[in-house]
Amino acid sequence: MPATTHAVRYRPSAWMRTSRWIRSHLIAAYGILALLYLFLPIAVVFLFSFNKPVGRQNSTWNAFSFDAWTHISRDPTIMNALGISLRIALVATFVATILGSLIAFALVRYRFIGRSSTNLIIFLPMATPEVVLGASLLALFLNMGLPLGFTTIAIAHIMFCISFVVVTVKSRLQGMDPRLEEAAADLYANERETFRYVTLPLVAPGIAAAALLSFSLSFDDYIITNFNSGTIVTFPMYVWGAAQRGIPPQVNVIGSIMFFGSLAIVIAAQLVGKARRKA
């Protein structure tokens, strides 16, 4: 009878199994570490919003307290600076979103002289250092004789927010399927109806994302605002000034509210989009 041979099953060593597992999960580990690095400062800000500091410095943990959350408006200077920043951000977001969306439609849907140059110019405010942009706008306002204040800050914010709106809405428009609008035209919809019922709903997520980005950029801007503020004190400028004598915990509370509010809006948009896709 022929001799029976038994196949020997190869079993990799523990080192090889470990290295294989590490290679297969390396990208996920890098992603988790990057997220931890990004969210660690936010976690510290949220944690110290519950601190009850001794004196004016809120950099050392002393005792857990809800005092800062229940007395946010204790210092009227903070609320005044916060109100100014919110008003400027709302104005800049509203104007920049409208103008930037119109520019994005023009760049994607139409061919005109200087279109390539316009595409290049749109990116210049994004690539220009804020110090240069702020100083240039300051020189412009002084030469025009405009008094520095709320108006000059709003104009400056609108000018650098437009670029971000154009880029965001433009990417959304370029990803649209033109056959959807052609189908609406085949179904006897005129241009206005096609835009209202087909184009606008498809572009709306991009416009909303651009508006949120503009609001965030305008609300937390310090460098350009500092050049063109005059006697106006926005919330970032108040935080910078308070850092020299001690930042109150109410600043951490406001920062936490802004972060979690933005996070809630993003999560709600994702859930609504997911529900619409299922429907």
Image (spheres, helix red, strand yellow):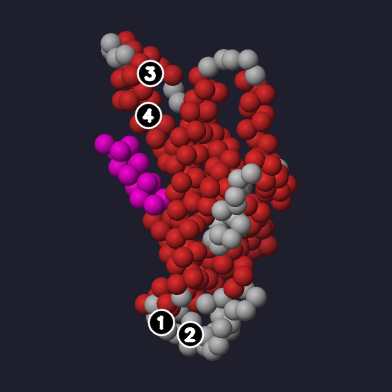
From what the image shows, is residue 85 above or below residue 171?
below
Q: Quadrant of residue 222?
A: bottom right
**Magenta stretch, residue numbers:** 265-279
Q: Name the residue beneath numbered marker 3.
A: 181
**Type of amino acid at the residue the image marks with label 3:** Glu
The dominant secondary structure in magenta is helix
Looking at the image, residue 164 sits to the left or right of residue 227; the answer is left
Residue 122: horizontal and vertical position, in percent? 63, 33
Q: Which quadrant of the rendered structure holds the C terminus?
A: top left
Q: Can see residue 137?
A: no
**Residue 202: which numbered mark, if any?**
none
Q: Name the residue beneath numbered marker 1.
A: 67
The residues bearing labels 1 and 4 have C-alpha atoms spaced at a distance of 46 Å
Residue 85: horizontal and vertical position, in percent? 49, 57
Secondary structure category for the residue under label 1: helix
**Type of amino acid at the residue the image marks with label 1:** Asp
Looking at the image, residue 95 sits to the left or right of residue 20; the answer is left
Secondary structure category for the residue under label 2: loop
From what the image shows, is residue 108 above or below residue 172?
above
Callout 2–callout 3 Cβ contact below 8 Å: no
Q: Name the residue beneath numbered marker 4.
A: 200
Q: Can see residue 68?
A: yes
Q: Which quadrant of the rendered structure holds the N terminus?
A: top right
From what the image shows, is residue 237 above or below residue 97?
below
Residue depth check, mark 2 versus mark 3: number of the one nearer the observer: 2
Q: Earlier in the sequence, mark 2 or mark 3?
A: 2
Q: Name the residue beneath numbered marker 2.
A: 52
Q: Earlier in the sequence, mark 2 or mark 4?
A: 2
Q: Earlier in the sequence, mark 2 or mark 1?
A: 2
Magenta span contains residue 172: no
